[in-house]
Amino acid sequence: MFKFIDKVIENELSHLNDHVPVEFRNIETILKNKLFHFKLKDSSYHYISESEFKEFISLIPDKFYRYVSLPIVFLRRIDLGSGAYTVSGSKYNVLSVKIVLGEISTENYSEYLKKIDSSSFVLYKPHIMQFRKMFRTLSIIAFSVK
């Protein structure tokens, strides 16, 4: 009985995430190919603002361009409590978000790089709102139970 309910929930969650990209590009590739769109799970496209993109890359170290993939996906983590999110992707995605939010500077990011784990960095709704206010088209919110 519980397996059936788990399957129903899993199926519903999968439909909640139809707006999630099936392809990502790192900053380096976007700069090289000038491709500012990403195919989504529902076969539509998500377009990012070129001006937001330029502003975003001006805030992070050039060394990140190869490792930060866009769009940034904030996972709404029901299992972590009310309003909790994690950043999907590499630790460079996490560090980029931390830099943009002013939690770390571009000068001291290397010490965080050694010890950060992308799945352990939890954000809350005010952080997400702050980031999306600045970079709405560069991020997507998805839902996860684990």
Image (tube, grey):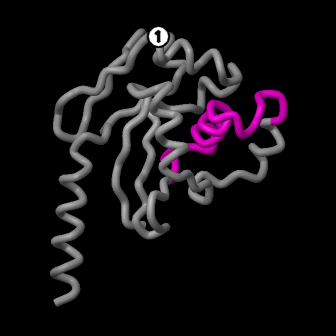
Q: Is residue 102 magenta?
A: yes
Horizontally, residue 99 falls left or right of residue 93, namely right
Which residue occupies 60% across, 23% down? 65
Which residue occupies 32% across, 37% down? 21
Image position of 15 with respect to 28: above or below: below
Q: Position of residue 52 (x, y in %)?
A: 47, 17
Image position of 116 with respect to 10: above or below: above
Q: Position of residue 83 (x, y in %)?
A: 45, 58
Image position of 54 with respect to 104: above or below: above
Q: Is residue 9 magenta?
A: no
Name the residue type under label 1. Answer: Ser
Horizontally, residue 60 falls left or right of residue 105, namely left
Quadrant where the C terminus lies?
Answer: bottom left
> What residue is pinned by disc 1?
51
Image position of 111 with respect to 25: above or below: below
Q: Which image quadrant for residue 18? A: top left
Looking at this view, is 122 or 57 the one in front? Answer: 122
Highlighted range, magenta: 86-108
